[in-house]
Image (cartoon, grey):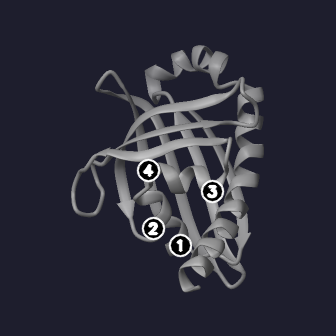
Amino acid sequence: MISHLVEVPVQNATASMFYDFMIAPTSARYRAWWPGEHLDFNIVKRGAKNHLGDVVFMDEYLGSKNRRLTGFAVIVRAKRPNHIVWQMKKAGLRLPIFVSLRLKDTPNGVIVKHEVRIGYRSLGTALDPLIRLYFNKSYQHALEVHCKKEWPMLAKYLEREASEQRA
């Protein structure tokens, strides 16, 4: 199994703010968060009341037009306000690809732990070299740079959105 973790401290934000945004995405808000980089993120099929089983579509660039993260995923874990896990899907089948978002409040803001886990355990690890052809060091670096930019940008976007609603 391949795991890639990016941890980002973000000032002026809370776990609840980020959780509420990410658990019920809309494409308009997603694009407004990072225009040109974020293309689409929305619920295409509703699951349970707490969003477990929601199917989402996500589409974004990772720093260049050559690297794109796009596809369907199902929410397999939703624990407000600290943890969301999406499992990627293709042709209706769940893939061994998980994107996890862990959020922890601190006195200065929130710590975001963004993890991608790909592959199988035990005998399935024999496929790791094939997975690494796609999810290579260059892709992981692009993902890390993307995460370190996007989470502070989300805090600024949500603050701007809140002040517009107050006005």
Residues under labels 1 and 2: Cα distance? 5 Å
Where residue 131 appears, x then y in whole percent?
Answer: 58, 20
Residues under labels 1 and 4: Cα distance? 17 Å
Q: Earlier in the sequence, mark 2 or mark 3?
A: 2
Q: Which residue is the extreme one toward the front?
A: 167
The quadrant in which residue 102 appears is bottom right
Is residue 4 or residue 163 the one in the foreground? 163
**Identity, as a three-letter code, of the amino acid under mark 4:** Val
Q: Secondary structure at mark 2?
A: helix
Label 4 sits on residue = 85
**For residue 135, above or below residue 82:** above
Label 1 sits on residue = 17
**Identity, as a three-letter code, of the amino acid under mark 1:** Met
Q: Residue at x 71, y 61 (%)?
A: 153
In contact (CB < 8 Å): disc 1 and disc 2: yes
Q: Residue at x 62, y 57 (%)?
A: 113
